[in-house]
């Protein structure tokens, strides 16, 4: 039984992430989508909201589990006895950073293999930050995020926009 972990910020989940989840779920017996928390980054959505978004759109994939973790990915990888780390690659600009992380993870744990899946055509230009910027200014994000969570994403982004305005 092969277990893969797909880690990321997912702030919020986009159709690009979902495409990687669906494809990876077909390749492995079990796929754990891991909402990772980087204390150096600030997020628009709480981990609970992000986990809930991912659960709502992956309910039809029985071998997908969603979890969150605020420690080192490789510690979680060992704890879950996983075999593979899955990453999505949009462009060459993703590659350098992802390649470096793959090497570090392999150095920390020899069994930790990273597998890269290339983004699909639309996913190539899609990022969570782009979705947040469009939603912040009232633009149409319906082709970029799963429809089940679109309204909640807009609500969350507008809540952040309001908090930012209140600060100034
Ligand atoms: P970001 O790198 O934009 O902060 P995440 O940390 O949530 O996004 O990304 C988690 C993983 O998903 C990374 O491997 C990233 O390269 C990949 N990814 C992000 N957006 C897409 C997309 N649109 N298509 C395919 N893979 C993606």
Image (cartoon, rainbow, N blue to C red):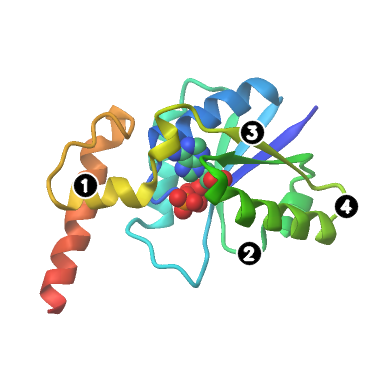
Label 1: few (<14), some or many (≥20) within 10 Å? some
Across and down, in percent, residue 141 comes to 23, 37
Residue occupied by mark 2: 71
Q: Nearer the viewer, residue 86 or 117?
A: 117
Label 3: few (<14), some or many (≥20) within 10 Å? many
Residue occupied by mark 4: 110
**Would you say 157 lies left or right of 165 here?**
right
Mark closer to the chain start, 3 or 2: 3
What is the quadrant of residue 24 in the picture? Answer: top right
Residue occupied by mark 3: 31
**Would you say 154 lies left or right of 33 here?**
left
Label 4: few (<14), some or many (≥20) within 10 Å? few
What is the residue that sits farthest to the front in this orientation?
A: 92
**Would you say 166 lies left or right of 142 here?**
left
Q: Nearer the viewer, residue 68 or 120?
A: 120
The answer to whether one can see residue 132 in this image is yes
The answer to whether one can see residue 34 in this image is no
Asked whether the residues under the numbered discs 1 and 2 touch, taking CB atoms below 8 Å apart as contact, a structural biologist would say no
Q: Nearer the viewer, mark 2 or mark 4?
A: 4
Q: Nearer the viewer, mark 3 or mark 1?
A: 1
Q: CA distance from mark 4 to mark 1?
A: 41 Å
> Which residue is rendered at x = 12% and y = 70% of the image?
165
The numbered disc on residue 134 is: 1
Q: CA distance from mark 2 to mark 4?
A: 19 Å
| SS for dot 4 | loop
> Which residue is rendered at x = 47% and y = 28% of the image?
58
| SS for dot 3 | strand
């Amino acid at each position: 039984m092969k277990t893969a972990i797909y880690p990321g910020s997912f702030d919020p989940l986009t159709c690009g992430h979902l495409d990687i989840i669906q494809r990876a779920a077909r390749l492995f017996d079990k796929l754990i989508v891991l909402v990772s928390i980087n204390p150096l980054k600030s997020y628009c959505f709480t981990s609970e909201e992000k986990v809930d978004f991912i659960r709502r759109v992956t309910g039809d994939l029985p071998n997908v589990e969603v979890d969150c973790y605020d420690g080192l990915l490789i510690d979680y990888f060992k704890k879950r006895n996983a075999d593979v780390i899955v990453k999505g690659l949009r462009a060459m600009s993703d590659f350098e950073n992802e390649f470096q992380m793959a090497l570090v993870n392999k150095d920390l744990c020899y069994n930790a293999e990273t597998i890269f899946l290339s983004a699909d055509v639309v996913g190539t230009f899609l990022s969570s930050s782009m979705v947040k910027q469009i939603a912040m200014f009232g633009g149409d994000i319906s082709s970029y995020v799963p429809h089940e969570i679109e309204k909640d994403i807009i609500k969350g982004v507008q809540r952040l926009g309001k908090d930012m305005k209140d600060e100034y």
